[in-house]
Amino acid sequence: MPDIYSIHRNIDLWGPEDVNLFVPERHITKRHPAAYLAFGVGSRNCVGMRFALMELKMCLAHLLHTYNVLAGDKLRQ
């Protein structure tokens, strides 16, 4: 867990900005696919990954079923 924590906060990978701040521009740079290991990688990946992704899809489907999504004025051309 310390190897993963240190990778997620490595200044060489994520830039000189504070890693705890949301800076969208830092994601423009291409990085190694294992630079961010939210669920792990390879044969030892997280067993809850499939469950988390299914739960996310179910929540999105429920929101779309419950609410009507309309285009805003800024999206219309």
Image: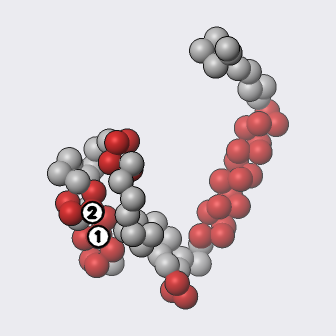
5 shown above or below 42? above
The kind of residue on which mark 2 rests is Leu
The quadrant in which the C terminus is found is top right
Residue sitting at 66 percent across and 70 percent down? 50
Foreground: 8 or 75?
A: 75
Position of residue 41 measured from the top left corner of the image (x, y, whole percent): 49, 78
Residue sitting at 27 percent across and 57 percent down? 14
Determine whether, in the image, residue 40 is placed left or right of residue 77.
Answer: left
Q: Residues within 10 Å of mark 1 (few under 14, many from 20)?
A: some
37 shown above or below 18? below
Q: Which residue is mark 1?
A: 7
9 shown above or below 56? below
Give me the C-alpha separation between circle 1 and circle 2. 8 Å
Q: Quadrant of residue 35?
A: bottom left
Q: Is residue 22 visible?
A: no
Foreground: 25 or 2?
A: 25
Q: Which residue is mark 2?
A: 13
